[in-house]
Image (cartoon, rainbow, N blue to C red):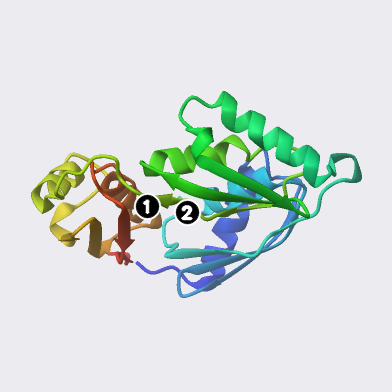
Amino acid sequence: MKKSDTILEKEVSETIKWEPLLHSNDIDVKAHDGIVTLGGTVDNYAQKKEAAKAVKNISGVKAVVDAIKVDLFFSAIRSDQEITSSVAHALQENWAVPNHMIKVTVKDGWVTLDGILHWDFQRKAAESAIRYLEGVRGVIDNIKIEAEIKNELQKEFVEKALRRSWLLDIDNIRVRVDEKTIILSGIVESLFQKEEAERIAWNTPGVCYVDNELLVELN
């Protein structure tokens, strides 16, 4: 059953307040036809990411628009040079990140990541590694994926991988392959399932891009 905008806004607000990292922050919530927009301010970038993550797990949410701004405490403000040094150290200490393949630039607290990696999990690990660093206001991820493995993508292998997840109903998901791109289409019941399907597709050896066209529809 489809939830009204009012009910969805209430559930989103309650979910945000339930998170220990977020309960003291002033986050505005607006919902329209399953699309949730988050506004207001938080104290750091980690809280901004946590808010969006929490909302994606709520039944009835089709998409999240993250318009939250990071308003740092004065004591948390760092120079761009200090942030650059902290980011470089964080990437170097993370075994999942080939830091020598990533270029880091910082301007006004915004961290931009450029470069080419072989796997999507490496890209996500890079962003996660700097999420909790002081002074970071946001991250611009320009990293591209170029698979080191030159395997030809097989639609059947992707479908088998999706079928192994108990979270997904593969009968409602269609998979297409176009060279190094995997296209997902069809219907899932939650935003969480949509992102889970994309995560699994990104794990395919040889993939360079995943086009996630899945629609979220409640039964």
**How many tags in the picture?**
2
**Label 2 amino acid?**
Lys
Q: Which residue is depicted at the point 70% across and 45% down?
A: 23
Q: Which residue is depicted at the point 60% across and 49% down?
A: 49
Look at mark 1 in the image and give the residue it sits on. 195
Relative to residue 70, is residue 98 depicted above or below?
above
Q: Is residue 14 left or right of residue 133?
A: left
Q: Position of residue 56 (x, y in %)?
A: 47, 54
Q: Position of residue 57 (x, y in %)?
A: 45, 50
* Local crowd size for mark 2, using a 10 Å CA cut-off: few (<14), some (14–19), many (≥20): many
Which quadrant of the rendered structure holds the C terminus? bottom left
Q: Nearer the viewer, mark 2 or mark 1?
A: 1
Look at mark 2 in the image and give the residue it sits on. 56
**Label 1 amino acid?**
Glu
Q: Nearer the viewer, residue 31 or 111?
A: 111
Q: In the picture, residue 92 is in which quadrant?
A: top right
